[in-house]
């Protein structure tokens, strides 16, 4: 069997660990692996052939010592052409030209959506691996890259807290998460922030100002508000203006962490999860599965239909929302 593997969409720490697992798991079972560079963009280019710049045979040594590196050695992209029927048909033709029997796309909701659309016109097997710092994919408790992104954001907030405390300020820290508040919520709890503003819940600037005033009366000298970039308030800078207009007693500063959250050395948790899911994807293909996503729920490796992974919104854990509220006193 010949298995293709690609990374698509935003990079996430741990993608390389997943890629390494796919290659070594397949090779250990006697199968070939073709690495496809630049995600769906590379896959949908004209006349793709093996052992070229965009597609080449991977062996165990080609993925040696990559588990500790962020990003992806296959490179990634966001491909507009793949969104068209013509682009997907070129991709399917290239898979046939390369003699690929099964494909393992590694990425977030856009990558998994592309996999589901490709499955409608290509007869090979497809098992996706969820890798995104947003942790917004149904069918797995955590996605590859989420742990590292939280750690990165928390490390930054720990430094900002020193300045906030020294100058008695309120810092609004913007993290990624255009449609999901997982990163903001987990970061807020881990960093000891007072508030997390997430896309799932309408933001009330007046209520935040009232909370800040009450906590100031209790003796608090600084405040951290973690803001998802996709929140309806328009991000940290916009919310900062709203707080000032609502009469916030503390001077505010906004900081957008941006793409720094997507890079860096993967945490052990992301390395392990990436390795587990990459291996599980290969084993699932060898067992005949297709049209599924590999995930981990309650410590168990599970398969979920690709369609479910991209059609449903992953709700925030209410227990963590309430925990943050109780800790903000």
Image (spheres, rainbow, N blue to C red):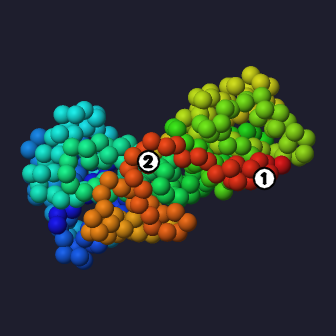
Q: Is residue 74 left or right of residue 307?
A: left
Q: Which mark is residue 123?
A: none
Q: Is residue 134 left or right of residue 218?
A: left
The residue where tag 1 is placed is 327
Circle nearer the N terminus (2, 1): 2
Helix or strand or loop: what does disc 1 sit on? helix
> Where's residue 196, x and y in %?
67, 43
Is residue 133 among what the camera can see? no
> Where's residue 317, x and y in %?
64, 51
Q: Is residue 78 left or right of residue 329?
A: left
Q: Which residue is pictured at 11% across the width and 40% down the height?
A: 46
The residue where tag 2 is placed is 308
* Label 2 Cα neighbours within 10 Å, binned few <14 / some 14-19 / many ≥20: some
Q: Nearer the viewer, residue 232 or 214?
A: 232
Q: Is residue 226 left or right of residue 152?
A: right
Q: CA distance from mark 2 to mark 1?
A: 34 Å
Q: Name the mark nearer the viewer: 2 or 1.
A: 2
Question: Are the two marked residues, 2 and 1, in contact with CB atoms closer than 8 angstroms?
Answer: no
């Amino acid at each position: 069997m010949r298995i293709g593997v690609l990374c698509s969409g935003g990079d996430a720490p741990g993608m390389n660990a997943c890629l390494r697992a796919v290659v070594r798991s397949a090779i250990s079972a006697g199968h070939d692996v073709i690495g496809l560079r630049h995600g769906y963009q590379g896959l949908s280019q004209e006349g793709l052939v093996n052992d070229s710049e965009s597609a080449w045979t991977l062996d165990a040594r080609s993925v040696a010592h990559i588990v500790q590196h962020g990003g992806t050695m296959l490179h990634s992209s966001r491909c507009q052409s793949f969104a068209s029927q013509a682009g997907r048909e070129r991709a399917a033709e290239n898979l046939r030209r390369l003699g690929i029997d099964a494909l393992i796309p590694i990425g977030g909701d856009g990558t998994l959506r592309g996999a589901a659309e490709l499955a409608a016109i290509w007869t090979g097997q497809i098992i996706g691996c969820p890798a995104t710092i947003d942790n917004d994919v149904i069918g797995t408790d955590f996605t590859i890259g989420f742990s590292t992104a939280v750690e990165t954001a928390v490390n930054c907030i720990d430094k900002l807290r020193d300045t906030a405390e020294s100058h008695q300020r309120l810092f609004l820290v913007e993290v990624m998460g255009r449609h999901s508040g997982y990163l903001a919520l987990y970061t807020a709890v881990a960093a000891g922030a007072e508030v997390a503003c997430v896309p799932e819940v309408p933001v009330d600037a007046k209520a935040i100002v009232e909370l800040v005033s009450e906590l100031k009366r209790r003796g608090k000298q600084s405040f951290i508000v973690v803001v998802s970039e996709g929140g309806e308030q328009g991000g940290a800078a916009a919310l900062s203006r709203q707080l000032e207009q609502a009469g916030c007693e503390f001077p505010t500063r906004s900081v957008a962490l941006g793409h720094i959250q997507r890079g860096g050395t993967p945490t052990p948790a992301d390395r392990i999860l990436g390795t587990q899911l990459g291996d599980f994807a290969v084993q699932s293909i060898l067992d005949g599965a297709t049209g599924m996503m590999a995930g981990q729920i309650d410590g168990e490796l599970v398969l979920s239909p690709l369609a479910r992974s991209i059609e449903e919104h992953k709700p925030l854990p209410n227990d963590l929302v309430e925990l943050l509220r109780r800790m903000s006193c």
